[in-house]
Image (spheres, rainbow, N blue to C red):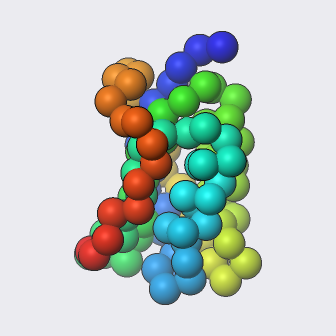
Amino acid sequence: MAKVRAHLIIEGIVQGVFFRAHTKEQADRNSIHGWVRNRPDSAVEAVFEGDEEPVKKLIEWCHNGPPEAVVENVKTDWEAYKGEFKNFTVIQGV
């Protein structure tokens, strides 16, 4: 299966609703590496690397997020796979 990398910006009510923690749970379940963090503009930003189908599945999940989230927009940029991550990390702070 092809390895892919996606860079996402998730907009809406996505901070303060455990979006990052739930994203990490989903990534860990699907062997996806990368990171997720809050941005100063109230969006959440993430980079996912892994097998193509699980990454696409996680991107689809991000369109809804956890139950408390109200996702308004997900911007996805496909980038060249780098294989630079050993796990999935929640970056603390804004």
Where, quadrant-wise, is the N terminus in this rendering? Answer: top right
Identify the residue at horizontal 55%, vertical 58% (top origin): 24
Say if 51 sits above or below 60 in the image: above
Q: Is residue 60 visible?
A: yes
**Picture coordinates of residue 88 (x, y %)?**
46, 48
Identify the residue at horizontal 61%, vertical 66% (top origin): 22
Looking at this view, name the residue that lies furthest to the front: 86
Identify the residue at horizontal 33%, vertical 63% (top origin): 91
**Picture coordinates of residue 65 (x, y %)?**
65, 66
Query: Residue 32 occupies which quadrant of the picture?
Result: top right
**Picture coordinates of residue 5 (x, y %)?**
46, 31
Say if 14 sits above or below 25 in the image: below
Identify the residue at horizontal 67%, vertical 83% (top origin): 68
**Numbered label tally:** 0
Query: Residue 53 occupies which quadrant of the picture?
Result: top right
**Picture coordinates of residue 69 (x, y %)?**
63, 78
Query: Residue 41 occupies which quadrant of the picture?
Result: bottom left
Q: Is residue 6 visible?
A: no
Say if 64 sits above or below 48 in the image: below
Where, quadrant-wise, is the C terminus in this rendering? Answer: bottom left
